[in-house]
Image: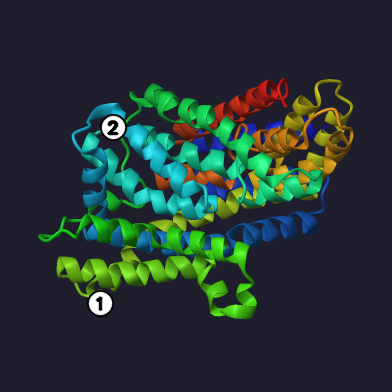
Amino acid sequence: MPLLITFLAVVALLTLIVFLKWHPFIALVLVAIGAGLGLGMTAEATISSVTSGVGGTLGDLALILGLGAALGGVIAETGAAQVITDKLLGRHRGSSVVWGLCLVGFLIGIPLFYSVAFVMMAPIIFATAKKTGLPLAMVAVASVASLSVTHGFLPPHPAPVLIAGTFGADLGKTLLYGLILAVPSVVIAGPLFAQTLRGMPQTTGAAVLDEAETPTHLPSFTSSVLCALLPVLLLAGIAVLRSVSDLAGVVPWLLLVGDATVALLLGVIVAMVVLGRQTGQSVGNLMGRVGTQLAPMAAVLLIIAGGGAFKQVLVDSGTSTYIVTTLEGFNAHPLIIAWLIAAALRITLGSATVAAITAAGIVLPLASGGTVAPELLVLAVGAGSLTCSHVNDTGFWLFKEYFGLTVTQTLRSWTVMETVVSVIGLLGCLGLSLVV
């Protein structure tokens, strides 16, 4: 029964948004309430679940997306995005440019949490789509595939680290095996799959970063890159320092700089000062544009919050537990069981991180059985947690709204890309299990 109600809720949501043209935020909240009541929750419990889902989802994400939008606006309006894009593309034209963006996304994605890396890549994605004329969805998929792979497979991202700790897996081996799996996953789900999106209609995206007027004086390439990647460099640098010394006892304030929100805030201010000076624009003038840059993010955040409400109802109603319990008795290879449980949680919960961490506790007996390397179980769970992202995943709505896509286009691009990454990850784990 929970499976049927969940299926009907997803169908109702797609019908409201795709066919009846309802706003996703209103549709998500309505379906979340209906699903809660249909799954046997009381009215009070349903509303409480919806409210906690909205609050829990927004949390730090509101600050990260807001500051990311501001930084992206500065990078675009000072011409820094154009400078970076021109340098990266060189004389390349057409679809070949997506390979360079894929590499940039991979390098940025290794040290950064997904949402932070996403907003770092956004202005470059917009600028590249404008310069090449390629569909924004195609460019975005080629870039974002790298971020999904690093988020699901590689330490120091939260899920792989926590799962490795649960299974007693060696982090060094997990990283090594993860990198082996990452290469084919990124290549196939990124640049290669992106080619199939060449015919998708062009979109402008929610941030509309490509409408900014190019200033008369462009900043230098070095300044453009450093300002765009300053939050990345700060977070990566602090992470390295943390691994070799006790920052709290030596330089306590560095812990503050190592926070994603603070790093982005510093990035916005430094970018305004440095790039503004090189392009002849005052900090006050650039600050005056922040409100315009933040406005589109309000709708994005509300839709993401609606997705979080739907997800929380499925969690609090016990639907995810029901599905996982059903799968526990499935007789198959341990890696396939681990992948299936993580995938079931991902489909019902939405959050990849939550799905991975929850699945780790469930499949722990497989790790202690000694029939398969615990490092491969870590990667199998991580791969399963990425599969089939759909309407209850905040990442689905972030991708859709940021790049101005319809639900159908997002399913065709984002959902398929995530599923390809997941399946390649599982196949890679099974292959590695033959030799390790």
- Is 47 displayed left or right of 112 in the figure? right
Residue extending furthest toward the front: 244
Q: Amino acid at mark 2?
A: Leu
What colour scheme has been applied to the protein in the rendered image? rainbow
Residue 370: which disc?
Answer: none
Residue sitting at x 64%, y 79%: 249
Label 1 sits on residue: 284
Residue sitting at x 49%, y 32%: 186
Quarter of the picture containing the C terminus is top right
Residues packed near mark 2 inside 10 Å, few (<14), some (14 to 19) or many (20 plus): many
Residue sitting at x 34%, y 25%: 198
Can residue 416 be seen here? The reply is no
Residue extending furthest toward the left: 216
- Is 382 displayed left or right of 287 in the figure? right
Label 2 sits on residue: 134
Residue 123 % position (x, y): 33, 51
Which badge, 1 or 2, is on the more N-terminal residue?
2
> CA separation, marks 1 and 2?
34 Å
Q: Nearer the viewer, residue 419 or 103?
A: 103
Q: Nearer the viewer, residue 431 or 332?
A: 431
Residue sitting at x 69%, y 60%: 52
Q: Amino acid at mark 1?
A: Gly
Quarter of the picture containing the N terminus is top right
Give the quadrant of residue 34: top right
